[in-house]
Amino acid sequence: MTSKTVAELLKADFKSEDIDIKGWVRTFRANRFIALNDGSSLQNIQCVVDFENTDEKILKRITTGAAVHIKGQLTESQGKGQSVEIKVEQITILGDSDPETYPIQPKKHSFEFLRENAHLRTRTNTFSAVMRLRSTLSFAIHKYFNDNGFYYMHTPIITGSDAEGAGEMFRVTGLDPKNPPLTEDGKVDYKEDFFGKETNLTVSGQLEAEAYAMSLGKVYTFGPTFRAENSNTSRHLAEFWMIEPEVAFMDLAGNMDLAEDFMKSVLEYILEHNREDLEFLEQRLLEEEKTKPQAERSEMSLIEKLKFVVDNNFKRVSYTEAIDILKNSKPNKKKQFNYIIEEWGADLQSEHERFLVEKHFKRPVIIFDYPANIKAFYMRLNEDGKTVRAMDILFPGIGEMVGGSQREERLEVLKEKMKALEIDEEELWWYLDLRKYGTAVHSGFGLGFERLVMFVTGMGNIRDVIPFPRTPQNADF
Ligand code: 4AD
Ligand code: MG
């Protein structure tokens, strides 16, 4: 008796054997054919019920969504579309599923509807494929860093500092919001709080990763991060996963090389594994494309896009060059951008990024050396005194995938910057210590994991690539 998965049964060379398998009924046709899925594959295995010798009460309970345990014989399939099937000898209903109320009917459901049923949506092929790819991607990421001599470190979820200085933090407090203890001048007294200070959920593990890079050399984090930015877009989550490598003695050019090599390796891995899931999603997208006007259709299929990224160099341009391109571009002159680029120093809006990536360069683009005043406090100031060694990596269809930089390693320069931005030196005393004791050039970046999953799966909404998305007004599951 073997208890193999559906994927294993469909892949194996056929030999007649005793089978013991559990899974969920996708469909039950003609009182005879069960399409059984166990999550291991997009494919269902056909299980043929001997309805004449099966209790009618049991037959009635074989409904879409029910969990069943089947014992039988693996046989060569008579039907088209599958090589093997299971001749059912014994079937046990493990869990019934009322066909009147079960939300996942065997038909096409909208992604909005499935989002409202996030706990059941992985019973569909699209979402099971996306989540299997998500799992493989995270494995590929750990594999890349492990193969390249990085240590995986865990950074705190609860922190006292605002790593990005953007003030987009979720407060963590044990105080009674209606009746908090107050200081003499009437402010909330966080000294009375659990940690004796104000704390929040982390927006990035970077600062702690810097500390470990400055002793272990090459480290990375891969954990949840939280942003209380009220952006209700298809690319923002309030809780997302970020990969943050940090490397001692590496400058910005090395950082770009690392990011590019890393992303290409991970995409290569996914092309070699999970091919079936990729091809299924590619097909789904091709169908979707057919409904669009010719001019809006994508030039490349999903797999072609992934291969293109693996096989071609990312374009590297400085912020200043990018602004020149934008200034002289047709949409800018024709005032087709909402926000016209005239001045050096402005932050790029997503429509500018899309223009550069999708229309101008038509490939991933690394923009570097941004104006200091639109970037975070920790970035290394350039010799020109007005730009910092920052880099953003922009991807077609996604926009910003990676944000990173060479870090300011000079104590005095860093202190001045913090002073200008009113960042508390006492709060970051330990971060300043790293510049006092054995400071050195170091760099790193953060890659938004869900944006990578979007690129790989071709899904258009970030809510559809994380199991239970958290967005403004939504933490339902
Ligand atoms: O550019 P960000 O804010 O950079 C940092 O946090 C740095 N500390 C990283 C580092 O240098 N170690 O965020 C990095 C990436 C973005 O490029 C984007 O892909 C993703 O994280 N990201 C989000 N993804 C989903 N939802 C959000 N609200 C995101 N905010 C950032
Ligand atoms: Mg950024």
Image (tube, rainbow, N blue to C red):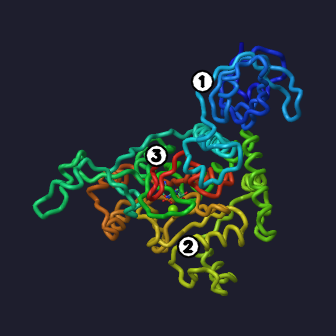
Q: Which residue is mark 3?
A: 213
According to the picture, the residue beneath numbered tag 1 turns out to be: 94
Q: Where does the image place residue 267, in percent across and percent down from the top left?
A: 69, 47
Can residue 290 be seen? yes
447 lies above or below 24: below
Residue 51 vs 223, above or below: the answer is above
Q: Residues within 10 Å of mark 1 (few under 14, many from 20)?
A: few
Separation of residues labelled 1 and 3 (CA atoms): 51 Å
In the rendered structure, find residue 348 and report the number of the disc placed on it.
Answer: 2
Amino acid type, label 3: Ala
Q: Residues within 10 Å of mark 3 (few under 14, many from 20)?
A: many
Q: Secondary structure at mark 1?
A: strand
Q: Is residue 164 above or below residue 56?
A: below
SS under mark 3? helix
Question: Which residue is at 86% across, 35% downward?
Answer: 81
Q: 321 or 229: nearer the eye? A: 229
Q: Position of residue 11 (x, y in %)?
A: 79, 28
Task: Name the outermost residue toward the bottom.
Answer: 334
Question: Which kind of residue does numbered mark 2 sit on?
Answer: Leu
Q: Residue 374: where, in percent of width, then height?
A: 46, 71
Report the amino acid beneath label 1: Leu
Mark 2–mark 3 Cα distance, whole angstroms, equals 30 Å
Judged left or right of residue 204, residue 36 is right
* Residue at the left extreme of this rendering: 184
- Residue 144 shows in the view: no
Looking at the picture, tell me which residue is in the foreground, 317 or 70. Answer: 70
Q: Earlier in the sequence, mark 2 or mark 1?
A: 1
- Mark 1 or mark 3, earlier in chain: 1
Against 256, is 271 above or below? above
Q: Residue at x 79, y 59 (%)?
A: 300
Q: Point out the tag, 2 or 3, that comes first from the N-terminus.
A: 3
